[in-house]
């Protein structure tokens, strides 16, 4: 196996792979440049009272996924949360609404239509989230900023919505024309840019800095080792191909392997779970700072803020369940046993002892479910471990660094695997040894 630097040299010498790498790097640079642009007419430190409030741990956690743009109130403050929530909504609707399920099965045309609807929903969610932030800020209990005119509010909402849509567009460009998953890479870029600051704040937030540093470093080592082992763990299913005669030549008859990974969904379950969990809390802050008069709604919002914060046991439990759920949910979107079984049947391939077609699909479903059971539990434990350690050790750096490193390491491994796959398909001998 070639060394990482040798792989990079080979990738840069390959025109199409080099182009994909440059597109990816360019999109990440543009993202970080735009992240430094503040919202017009609003002080950069306007959100500081929120981070210092009782719910500050939640806002610090959300700030991890936006790369510090929320704390600086950048035009990118909304981040990719609205887009991820919109994607999850349509994926869930596809499971219960027959019409959407039929559109999803129409191939490329159906995918484009669903993507268009997802973008439109993202605009709506981004606008509501931007207006919600203003509503929270003008509340005396959170910020108490001076009232803004209708024009100023409109400009702020439009800028933040445009920033969220542009970020979504950059992610789609990376996914289609770059390397790896664009959404994951953009979140990783934001985390990496803000990781030093978040860790430094955590090291000096109560307790001994040396003790906090030791716990964080130990947690990082555990995360890296376990993630590498999980990413490399693969179940190889033997596939044989029937012999065929074409043009007087004997074709087929060879055997191959169908690799099935334990972490089929990669890091996306953690991202999905975090974004979905953040949505009700954001709505709760919006309700408590708005002029809603319904006592039942206000009490529900207060209960969510109090009992579903990142430092609560309820959040830890729900996060664990969501990571397991999205591990299965996303894996069956990425790897569809029915489609794989149909492709094998069309190519004359079959799994020894298993009939082609429906029985093959059932067998692959059972195998993947068993792999996901192990992978999702380990991933869920690793994603909730920082919350548990933070609650019982009172070191804030554990949450910020533990969750961040978990995502960063996973994305790096996924991107490395994508580059390796592109180079292997080009028959580079160095990658086949």
Image: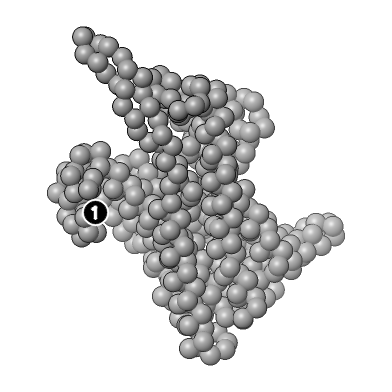
In depth, the one of 153 and 169 nearer the eye is: 169
Q: Which percent across, then down, holds residue 412? A: 37, 58
In depth, the one of 351 and 295 nearer the eye is: 351
In depth, the one of 32 and 295 nearer the eye is: 32
Local crowd size for mark 1, using a 10 Å CA cut-off: few (<14), some (14–19), many (≥20): few
Q: Is residue 107 visible?
A: no
Residue in view at x 66 percent, y 71 percent: 311
Question: Going by the image, does 246 lie left or right of 277?
Answer: left
Question: Going by the image, does 147 lie left or right of 260?
Answer: right
Residue in view at x 29 percent, y 48 percent: 419
Q: Which percent across, then down, holds residue 248? A: 21, 9
Q: Which percent across, then down, holds residue 397? A: 52, 77
Work out whether 177 lies above or below 82.
Answer: above
Residue in view at x 39 percent, y 61 percent: 189
List the single residue furthest toward the front: 353
Q: Which percent across, then down, holds residue 244? A: 31, 14
Q: Quadrant of the N terminus?
A: bottom left
Residue in view at x 47 percent, y 69 percent: 222
In depth, the one of 146 and 229 nearer the eye is: 229
| Residue holding disc 1 | 1
Number of numbered labels in the structure image = 1
Element assignment for label 1: loop
List the single residue furthest toward the right: 295
Q: Is residue 303 visible?
A: yes
């Amino acid at each position: 196996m070639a060394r990482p630097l040798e792989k990079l040299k080979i990738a840069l010498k390959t025109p199409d792979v080099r182009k994909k790498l440059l597109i990816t790097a360019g999109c990440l640079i543009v993202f970080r440049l735009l992240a430094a642009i503040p919202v017009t007419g609003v002080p950069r430190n306007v959100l500081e009272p929120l981070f210092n409030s009782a719910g500050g741990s939640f806002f610090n956690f959300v700030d991890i996924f936006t790369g510090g743009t929320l704390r600086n109130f950048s035009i990118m403050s909304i981040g990719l949360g609205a887009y991820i929530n919109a994607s999850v909504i349509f994926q869930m609707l596809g499971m219960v609404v027959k019409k959407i399920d039929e559109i999803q099965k129409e191939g490329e045309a159906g995918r484009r239509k669903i993507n268009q609807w997802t973008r439109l929903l993202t605009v709506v969610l981004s606008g509501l989230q931007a207006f919600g932030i203003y509503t929270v800020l003008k509340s005396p209990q959170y910020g108490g900023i001076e009232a803004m005119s209708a024009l100023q509010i409109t400009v702020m909402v439009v800028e933040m919505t445009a920033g969220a849509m542009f970020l979504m567009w950059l992610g789609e460009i990376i996914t289609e024309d770059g390397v790896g998953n664009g959404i994951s890479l953009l979140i990783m870029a934001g985390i990496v840019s803000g990781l030093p600051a978040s860790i430094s704040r955590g090291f000096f937030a109560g307790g001994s800095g040396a003790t906090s540093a030791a716990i964080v470093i130990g947690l990082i080592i555990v995360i890296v080792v376990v993630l590498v082992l999980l990413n490399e763990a693969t179940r190889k299913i033997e596939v044989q191909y029937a012999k065929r005669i074409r043009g007087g030549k004997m074709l087929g008859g060879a055997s191959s392997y169908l690799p099935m990974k334990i972490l089929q969904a990669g890091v996306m379950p953690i991202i999905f779970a975090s974004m979905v969990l953040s949505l009700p809390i954001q709505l709760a802050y919006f309700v408590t700072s708005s002029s809603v008069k319904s006592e039942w709604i206000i009490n529900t919002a207060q209960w969510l803020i109090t009992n579903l914060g990142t430092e609560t046991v309820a959040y830890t439990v729900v996060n664990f369940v969501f990571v397991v759920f999205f591990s299965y949910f996303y894996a069956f979107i990425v790897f569809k046993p029915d489609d794989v079984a149909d492709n094998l049947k069309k190519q004359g391939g079959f799994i020894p002892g298993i009939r082609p077609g429906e029985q093959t699909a059932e067998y692959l479903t059972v195998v993947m479910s068993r792999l996901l059971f192990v992978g999702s539990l380990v991933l869920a434990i690793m994603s909730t471990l920082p919350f548990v350690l933070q609650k019982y050790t009172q070191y804030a750096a554990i949450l910020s660094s533990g969750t961040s490193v978990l995502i960063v390491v996973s994305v790096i491994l996924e991107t490395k695997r994508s580059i390796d796959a592109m180079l292997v398909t080009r028959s580079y001998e160095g990658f086949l040894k």
